[in-house]
Image: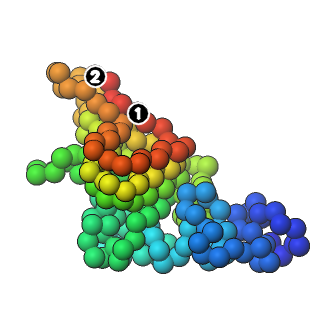
Amino acid sequence: MDASPDAEVDAATDTPPADTCLGDDADTPGDYVDQNCDGVDGVLGRQLYVSAAGADTNDGLTPTRPFASLERALRALAESTGMGRRVVLLTGGDYVAPTAMNQAGFFELNRSASLHGGYGADFRAATTGQATIVRGLGVGLVVRGTAESVTLTGLTLRGFWPDPMMPPTGQTGYGLIVIDAGAVRVARCRIEAPPG
């Protein structure tokens, strides 16, 4: 941590000097700065973590025990295992929706939540090395039936076809679909539709 008396954020750690640490309520996830000096962006203990280097057998409750898949984190949001958490932080990586039988092949968010991507392995700051790509069959992400707010930050939302040179006849692809939802905030995201 930067021990200098200035109020600048330390570029190496993205952490404010100790004398400028703010309270938990001031550290908003998705700004990629650890403003409350707890070691992560946002508030440690109030969010779920996802990293391609994680494991879905982890609890996803700390940066050292992240889930491996966005699918598992979305399931935890819906179950009591998420313990009321509504924020998911994701490291850079390629998160592909499962396409097994009885699964739609895209990610669906049907509750008030925030998904923030682009983090480095420590979940403190944005990484410059790898985008956070959320991919689904034809549709990257569907936000449906949420009366409250949804925030998406630092993600690439991408629909894809198994064979990009031959999209299914009559099919249209989307990066993001919003259906019957309240306020949806999208910031610093790329939304990419597959050809077709």
Q: Is residue 40 visible?
A: no
- Residue at 59% x, 54% y is 127
Local crowd size for mark 2, using a 10 Å CA cut-off: few (<14), some (14–19), many (≥20): some
- Relative side of 11 to 82, left or right: right
- Report the amino acid beneath label 1: Glu
> Which residue is under mark 1?
192
Quadrant of the image occupied by residue 61: bottom left
On the rendered image, what quadrant is the C terminus found in?
top left
Q: Position of residue 86 (x, y in %)?
A: 40, 66
- Relative side of 180 to 184, left or right: left
Which secondary structure lies at badge 1? strand
- Relative side of 170 to 63, left or right: left
> Which residue is under mark 2?
196
- Relative side of 131 to 32, left or right: left
Q: Position of residue 38 (x, y in %)?
A: 62, 77
Check the image and report above or below for 93 versus 61: above
- Report the amino acid beneath label 2: Gly
Quadrant of the image occupied by residue 81: bottom left
- Residue at 77% x, 64% y is 10
Marks 1 and 2 sit apart, C-alpha to C-alpha, by 12 Å
The type of colouring in the image is: rainbow
- Residue at 61% x, 49% y is 128
Check the image and report above or below for 52 versus 80: above
Q: Is residue 119 visible?
A: yes
